[in-house]
Image: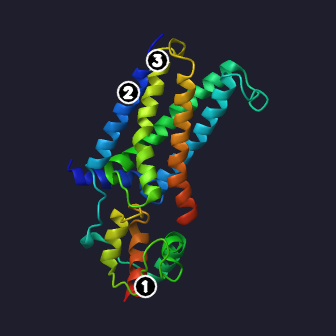
Amino acid sequence: MRSPAVPFTLLLVVAAGTFALARWHPFSPSAPNAAAAAQGDAARGASVYTTTCAGCHAADASGGVGPALRGSGLTADDVEAVVATGRGTMPAGLVSGQELADVAAYIATLSE
Amino acid sequence: MPLADVSSRYTDLVESVFSTAIAGKVWLATGAFVLACVQVLTASRMWGKLQRFVPVSFSTSRRIHRWSGRVALLLTLPVIFHCVMILGFETTDLRVTVHSIAGSFIYGVVAAKLLVIQHHSRNYPSWVLPVLGGTLAAVLTTLWLTSSLWYFTNVRFGF
């Protein structure tokens, strides 16, 4: 009869290795290149905001689980960088590409 | 390849199928979670339980169990790459902390279970394999609840 200590030790060793790798996480989320960023359309961004952002930031952007965006002073570039790399409880990359440019343009109109 | 390119190349690859990298990860994890449910049902049948609810033979259960496990493991590979190598261990709130801790354990449990199977589970005390299988299902369920379900209920339900 083999000892059950062996598989449970392996479990802990692999878990510790995964934890160490996750603490290191060598490949950081990539922020969008400002020069290459697409021009955002705030009208289209409003619908992206409703489907993707309103759940945490509230439909009127007054804040909820996530912080208030209305009157926050964020520029479109700020928004794109935060959405691309994540912040706090918000994971990186919830929106990308043209949708990211659109929603960033929309949020910039709210944050003025 | 510069390290910074790895993240964007991974993102480009996933976004060729899904709308965003996160959406891809959420659906791959959901696939793995569904297969984990299949794993629990077929394992129960193999251990003589739920015969009324899983009306398949022992050998069919075993075949389904093995293949669902292999596919589930494959589905988790891009997910774990994005979580561990790109996002990393975070403790920003309870959901993220629980997710990060459970995520650190999942491949450890997989490795332990595979080791026991490799050495023939009958060579270990009878409780070892069910405990590891149950732990794996519990960890995967925790990961799905704290990521995919959160995404579906707080962000959106779509590809």
Tell whether label 2 touches label 3 (CB within 8 Å): no
Dot 1: what SS?
Answer: loop
Give me the chain letter of mark 2: A
In this view, B129 is above or below A59: above
The Cα atoms of the two marked residues, 1 and 2, are separated by 50 Å
Q: Pointers 1 and 2 in contact (CB under 8 A)?
A: no
Mark 3 or 2, which is nearer the eye? Answer: 2
**Residue B158 visible to an observer of this rendering:** no
- What label sits on residue A4 in the rendered view? none
Tag 2, which secondary structure? helix
Q: Are marks 1 and 2 on the same chain?
A: yes
Residue placed most toward the observer, A7 or A24: A7
Other residues around mark 2 within 10 Å, as few (<14) / some (14–19) / many (≥20): some
Q: Which residue is mark 2?
A: A10
Chain ID for label 1? A
Residue B73 percent across, percent down from the top left: 48, 35
Q: Which residue is mark 1?
A: A70
Residue B62 in percent (x, y) is at 62, 22
Q: The C terminus of chain A appears in which quarter of the rendering?
A: bottom left
> Does label 1 or label 2 sit earlier along the sequence?
2
Q: Amino acid at mark 1?
A: Arg
Callout 3 amino acid: Gln
Q: Few, some or many C-alpha atoms within 10 Å of disc 3 (few <14, some 14-19, many ≥20)?
A: few
**Which corner quadrant of the image does residue B80 belong to?**
top left
Q: How many marks?
A: 3
Disc ID at residue B118: 3
Question: Callout 1: 10 Å neighbours few (<14), some, many (20+)?
Answer: some
Residue A37, x across and y down, in percent: 31, 71
Cα gap from disc 3 to disc 2, whole angstroms? 14 Å
Subunit ID for the residue under disc 3: B
